[in-house]
Image (tube, rainbow, N blue to C red):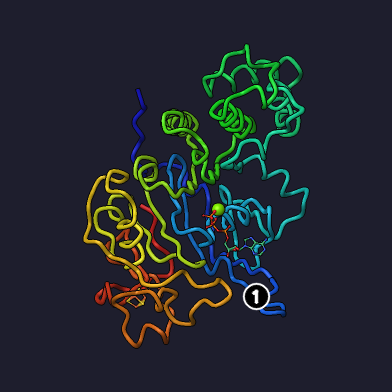
Amino acid sequence: MTPTKQAPSAERAPIALDVSSLRKEYRVRGAGRHVTLTAVDDVSFQIRPGETLALVGESGSGKSTIARCVTRLVEPTAGSVHIDGKPIIGISARQLSASYSDLQMVFQDPTSSLDPRMTVAATLDEPLRLHTRLDKEGRRARVAQLLADVELDESYLDRRPRQLSGGQRQRLSIARALAAEPKVILLDEPTASLDVSVRGQIIRLLKRLQVEHGLAYLFISHDLGVVRQMSDRVMVMYLGGIVEQGSTEEVFENPVHPYTKALLSAAPVVEYGREHDRLRLTGEIPSPMKVPAGCRLVGRCPIAEAACALKRPDLMLVTETHAVACPVSAPDAAPVLAVPVP
Ligand SMILES: Nc1ncnc2c1ncn2[C@@H]1O[C@H](COP(=O)(O)OP(=O)(O)OP(=O)(O)O)[C@@H](O)[C@H]1O
Ligand code: SF4
Ligand SMILES: [Mg+2]
């Protein structure tokens, strides 16, 4: 049975992951010269312990870049990231390594994060050697515990990744992420390469582990059905910026931004359980090197007005927990610097 989540309350630890004004620019070659591509533009969000924030949006919108900046796999151009109040950006490699155990990442393709030469036992022992003071016996017991946590038995200890199924490999990478007892796990399409039945098992596993360990998840996915099932809140991203953010129910039941409406319209109804008025965008997503100066959606939006091309809309609150960056769809909403976390 899937355990029930506790509702967030004021007594719980304040914020597990705090991302503020994050920006990532890449220098790329375009039309024969170097140009700046802004993959992530002024993105802020917070996640509480035990909470899942989903990040959705078309391919190339900047979702993985956010995860890579948070884990410092790439260096952000600007902004701050705090895990449990401790900074991740602007600190030395030694300080980062001390904070690193608090933050782990699980990727779509578990083979990319698993060393093919290492057995399951060695794969799980390595982070314990790096991040804990356990002796050999302690580590052996902890490895057994980690395997049990992800519902694999000890007969797998001597196997190598190629001797595991896709679902078992993902269980192993989740167990490895858990080894250092993180506070936050970034999950970048963790079920996208799995069969539907295995996908359901991994989702149930992630939910159980979240409750048992009080984990905060940033959950990146194209699968809106899984997002609906998995997340407490949803952030919708388009061309590097957040266009809508709210509770999962608000975003799925009452989408306000034309981009969110189009995204939900494009997904099969069975995926997320409710049919909305169909809204279709015109044209293709522009090159990230040619993002419009005003609203990013202006060239594709069926309800655009002349003013939309002039100024980039800020996020504005339509309810206490639901924000949208479109003054045409939400004319009475109030501008907000940061969306309050329930
Ligand atoms: N190392 C890089 N150098 C230059 N541009 C990059 C680099 N990594 C990503 N980008 C660009 O940044 C933008 C955002 O990419 P990102 O991978 O974050 O998108 P995404 O939302 O994760 O897409 P997908 O859903 O396909 O995984 C894209 O335009 C991408 O081409
Ligand atoms: S601000 Fe204008 S262009 Fe942008 S989503 Fe709203 S109506 Fe469309
Ligand atoms: Mg990605």
In the image, 11 versus 266, the foreground residue is: 266
Q: Identify the residue at horizontal 68%, vertical 52% (top origin).
A: 73
- The residue at label 1 has a CB less than 8 Å from ligand 1: no
Judged from the image, the secondary structure of the residue bearing numbered disc 1 is strand
Crowdedness near tag 1: few (<14), some (14–19) or many (≥20) residues, C-alpha within 10 Å: some
Ligand 2 shown in quarter: bottom left
* Foreground of the two, 308 or 116: 116
Q: Residue furthest top?
A: 155
When the figure is inspected, residue 162 is found, relative to residue 292, above or below; the finding is above
Foreground of the two, 77 or 320? 77
Asked if 125 appears above or below 247 in the picture, the reply is above
Residue that appears at 59% across and 19% down: 145
Please provide percent x and percent y for residue 30. Answer: 66, 76
Q: Residue at x 30, y 62 (%)?
A: 261
Instruction: Please tell me in which quadrant of the rendered image residue 171 appears.
Output: top right
Q: Quadrant of residue 175?
A: top right
Residue 85, given in percent of the width and then of the height, sits at: 57, 51
Q: Amino acid at mark 1?
A: Thr
Name the spot of residue 176 as percent of width and height, x first.
63, 31
Tally of marks: 1
Residue under numbered circle 1: 36
| Residue 133 locus on image (x, y percent) | 74, 27
